[in-house]
Structure formats: structure tokens, C-alpha cells
Image (cartoon, rainbow, N blue to C red):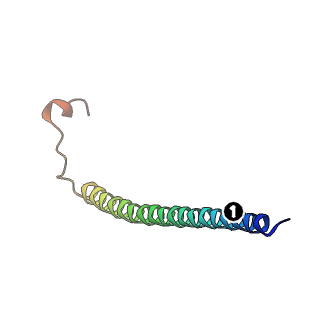
């Protein structure tokens, strides 16, 4: 091979290496972005779970109060004849 052909092959090799490096960098960026999105989704799910648990406790407390309060519900007169 002539020296020109060797340098041409080296140039093609360098281009190929640069393309591979660029694709690898893009893949790394995509993977980091996917990881960040997954972590954010997990964080949002945990927050929502805590909110849901808090609401459930509040509802349970209200039910307990209503169940212990005999004046909370007054049966209408028209229903009393059926009870």
C-alpha cells in the first residue's frame, strides 16, 4: 500500500472511532435521562402514597367520630315508621 492509502485508512478509522464515541455519548446521555425520569417517577409515587395514607387516616378519624356521635344522623320522621 502506498503511504496515501495508509493515511486514508487511518482517517476512515478515526472517523469510525469518532462516530462510535459520539453514539456512545448519546447512549450515555439517554441512559442518564431515563434514570433521572425513573427516579423522579419513584419520588412522585412515594409522595402520592404518603398523601393517600394521610387522607385515609383523616377519613378513618371522621368515620370514628361519626360512629360515636349519636346526634350526627337524625332519622327523618317518614323513615321512622319503617325502622
Q: Who's the residue at 78% across and 63% down the image?
A: 5
Q: Quadrant of the C terminus?
A: top left
Q: Position of residue 6 (x, y in %)?
A: 79, 67
Residue 11 vs residue 26, the one in the foreground: 11
| Secondary structure beneath label 1 | helix
Q: Position of residue 42 (x, y in %)?
A: 48, 64
- In the figure, 14 relative to 80: above or below? below
Q: Is 59 situated left or right of 18 in this image? A: left
Determine crowd level at label 1: few under 14, some 14-19, many 20+ residues with C-alpha closer than 10 A.
Answer: few
- Residue situated furthest left in the rendering: 77
Please tell me in which quadrant of the rendered image residue 54 appears. Answer: bottom left
Q: Is 49 situated left or right of 13 in this image? A: left
The residue indicated by pointer 1 is: 16
Q: Position of residue 11 (x, y in %)?
A: 69, 66
Q: Position of residue 21 (x, y in %)?
A: 63, 67
- In the figure, 4 relative to 81: above or below? below
Residue 45 vs residue 32, the one in the foreground: 32
Q: Who's the residue at 46% across and 61% down the image?
A: 41
Q: Number of marks in the image?
A: 1
Q: Who's the residue at 30% across and 55% down the image?
A: 63
Q: Who's the residue at 53% across and 66% down the image?
A: 29
Q: Is 47 situated left or right of 28 in this image? A: left
Please tell me in which quadrant of the rendered image residue 68 appears. Answer: bottom left
Amino acid at each position: 500500500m502506498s503511504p496515501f492509502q495508509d493515511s486514508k485508512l487511518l482517517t476512515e478509522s478515526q472517523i469510525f472511532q469518532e462516530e462510535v464515541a459520539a453514539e456512545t455519548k448519546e447512549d450515555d446521555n439517554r441512559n442518564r435521562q431515563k434514570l433521572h425520569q425513573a427516579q423522579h417517577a419513584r419520588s412522585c409515587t412515594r409522595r402520592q402514597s404518603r398523601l393517600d395514607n394521610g387522607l385515609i387516616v383523616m377519613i378513618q378519624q371522621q368515620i370514628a367520630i361519626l360512629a360515636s356521635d349519636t346526634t350526627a344522623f337524625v332519622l327523618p320522621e317518614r323513615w321512622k315508621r319503617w325502622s
